[in-house]
Image (cartoon, rainbow, N blue to C red):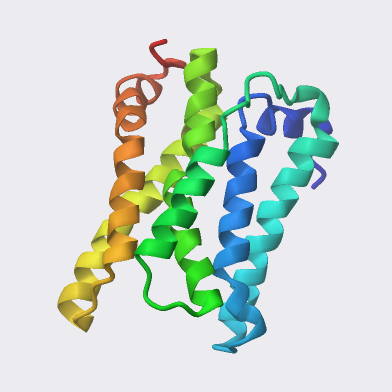
Amino acid sequence: MVVPAESLIKLYDSSISLRSQGLFALVFTLRYLDLFTTYISLYNTVMKILFITSSYGTCYLIFKKFRATYDHNVDNFPLQYPLGACVILALIFNHSWDPVELLWTVSIYLESVAIMPQLWMIQKTGEAESVTSHYLFALGAYRALYLLNWVYRYFEEDHFDAIVVFAGIIQTVLYCDFFYLYITKVLRGQRLKMPI
């Protein structure tokens, strides 16, 4: 089945932040540098490559294929602040000084704030398309469900990673306002409008 280009344009419309997608691509690139140093399993390797390629593929689609629908005037969140903060946090709070481990730590902190450009865009425009709202909810739900993973791993595996938990809490807090609006508006069939 071939999907018409007009349908894809609606998916990659101006309400998707290229800056957020670029940050997610950077997150997965930094996190999965161990692809070059450690083999765990075929499944693990394939999934890491899939995460990286799909992230860059999304950026390509937004920047090149559907460039006419992308509004860089609205997607202008200043990236130097979250990037700088994540690097500084990784240099202060890390598990080791191994370069791959430090970059993994940067990726954990960066994932927690990678959604900020997307939320900034919605705040600036005052609303989001339904597909964007559902996409953001899925990203937030993924992180919220990760809380259950931490609880499980703590009780079943006696494992607690303060860096991951801290970053996850920050990311979940960033989504709280969006979750409230999603539940009160989108699930009732209304278009998501953010207070300006």
- The quarter of the picture where residue 153 lies is bottom left
Does residue 145 appear in this view?
no
Q: Is residue 15 above or below residue 153?
A: above
Does residue 194 show up? Answer: yes
Residue 135: percent from the left, percent from the top?
Answer: 51, 38
Of 5 and 53, the residue lying toward us: 53
Q: Is residue 191 left or right of residue 170?
A: right
Determine whether 45 is above or below 89 in the image. below
Give the image location of residue 128, x and y in percent. 52, 21
Q: Residue at x 81, y 30 (%)?
A: 67
Asked if residue 36 lies left or right of residue 192, the reply is right
* Residue at the left extreme of this rendering: 155
User: Looking at the picture, how far across and down is residue 107, in whole percent?
Assistant: 50, 60
**Total labels drawn:** 0
Residue at the spot 34% in from the left edge and 54% down from the top edge: 167
Q: Nearer the viewer, residue 145 or 160?
A: 160
Q: Quadrant of the C terminus?
A: top left
Q: Is residue 44 above or below residue 18?
A: below
The residue shown at (26%, 58%) is: 147
Foreground of the two, 38 or 15: 38
Q: Vertically, is 161 above or below 181?
A: below
Residue 186 appears at what percent x and percent y? Answer: 40, 23
